[in-house]
Image (cartoon, rainbow, N blue to C red):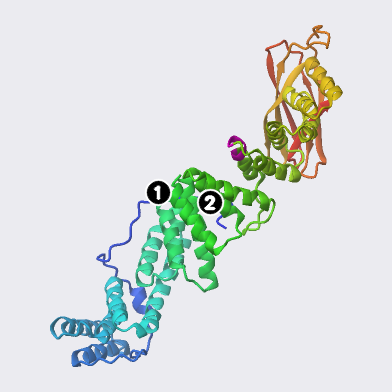
Amino acid sequence: MNAQIASTFILLSLSATAVSAQQPALNDRVAAAMPSKYEGASCGIKPNHFKVSSGASYLKTSIETEVPENKARSLGNGERVLLEAIKQNGQDKNPAAWYYLGRIYLRQGDLYHADSALSRAQALAPDCAKDISGYRRAAWGALLNAGSKFEQEKNSDSALAMFRQAGVIYPGSPRVYYGMATIMNDKGQTDSAAYYFGQAASAGENATDTIDVQIRDRSAFNQAALLLNAKKYDEAAAAFERYLKWNPKDVEAKRGLAGAYRGAGKVEQAQALEKELVAAGGAPSAAGAPPASQDLMAIGVNFYNEKKYPDAAAAFEKVVASEPYNRDALSNLSNTYLAMKNGAKLAETAAKLVAIEPLSENALKLLGEGYKQAGKVDQAVKTAEQVLALPADVKASNFVVSAGDATLTLSASGRAAQTPSGKAIPPAPVAIVVEFLNAAGGVVATEEAQVPALKSGASQEIPVAAKGSGITAWRYRRK
């Protein structure tokens, strides 16, 4: 259901947990990312206490001095006096105290204390959210860039450290979580990757930035796919449902959701979605790729096994319409019409199957049954005579296609052939011509082969190889 990160699904092993807020994280990059000029609080909060005012002054001094030792000393004094104001002078409810303390921690590169202080400031003064977010994003940007650079250099451990710290100071963007998920996925830690893809999707829940929206959606899809591959069906269903809220027309995601529903035992929900998918037919998905025929085939098989034959027929009909030489689709559709007792359609479809594999006993029997159900007695009798005289039952056991060649393996089994009067027909070889076809039904390559004379019960494989690009199907005929 490339996943986008391809239209196929990818999935990751959740061992990662959220980084403890007690873990120290001192980063010089954060200090360097802060504004080079001092500015007071743009949101209008006032110090309202001499120690808080003193702390702001120390911050200003640290920014304006050119002497590194003085910078560090001023920041240390600012931290000390603000903590005194909070702990000893009743300024714990003063948003300015926390605000300036948070900015000092950022200058010191102390991310976790900065996050804590700025969160307290914003809780006490919600109007300062934009002001505080600006400082957080400045730190986040520096860490994100550093992490991306480490990732490009294949230094995944350092990249992860930068991304984790960026997520602490500014959790409102999916980008760092996506970076972490990608690294975890590359490491084969699929549970952790699924977790962080989920974090990215949650962080971008209300995203408006175009890139953030794209990353959010990609992350949501990947999380769902990973969970589906891990057979965590209920979680996968919830993840696909979330993704489809943002991309309701994505056929690939709907296939994934149907699979999750089935895995979770929610058969009715799966069936309803699969009917929708069959109706969509070859409609393009959000990634621009049409639903693969194998997915429609799988849906048809599900419906057939659940005895919902009209729905199964609809799925197989879609495949046959787009791939008229798909032997498996024709066989499945014929058997579905047989179960529906629709003789006319069975005869029509089985005739196409016989045209592909004229030495198949099953294909001929399906054709004969179609004629019988349709009341075409003479044709039914004639087909039954063909079955009696069939020298060998030939089935396709394998068909492999690569960029420039294809191999068809036929399996022949000897039969006790006889005439309509019951006279035995001795085993005899049968020369055949195999045609390898492209998607439009054009012949790409032709090869001759021979079905050997086989006694009843004996069998032999007949491999037939061909060269040519674009091969998608096959058929054979008697020479």
Residue 319: which quarter of the image? top right
In the visual, does 424 lie left or right of 300? right
Q: How many marks?
A: 2
In terms of secondary structure, what is the magenta stretch mainly?
helix
Q: Which residue is found at the position 25% from the left and 91% from the top? A: 47
Q: Which residue is found at the position 45% from the left and 59% from the top? A: 197
User: On residue 13, which mark appears?
Assistant: 1
User: On residue 257, which mark appears?
Assistant: 2
Does the stretch in magenta take in 289? no
Front position in the image: 420 or 118: 420
x then y, percent, for residue 351? 80, 31
Q: Secondary structure at mark 1?
A: strand
Quick one: which residue is furthest to the front in this view? Answer: 375
The quarter in which the C terminus is drawn is top right
x then y, percent, for residue 447? 80, 30
Would you call the spot at circle 2 few (<14 residues within 10 Å), some (14-19), or many (20 or more)? many
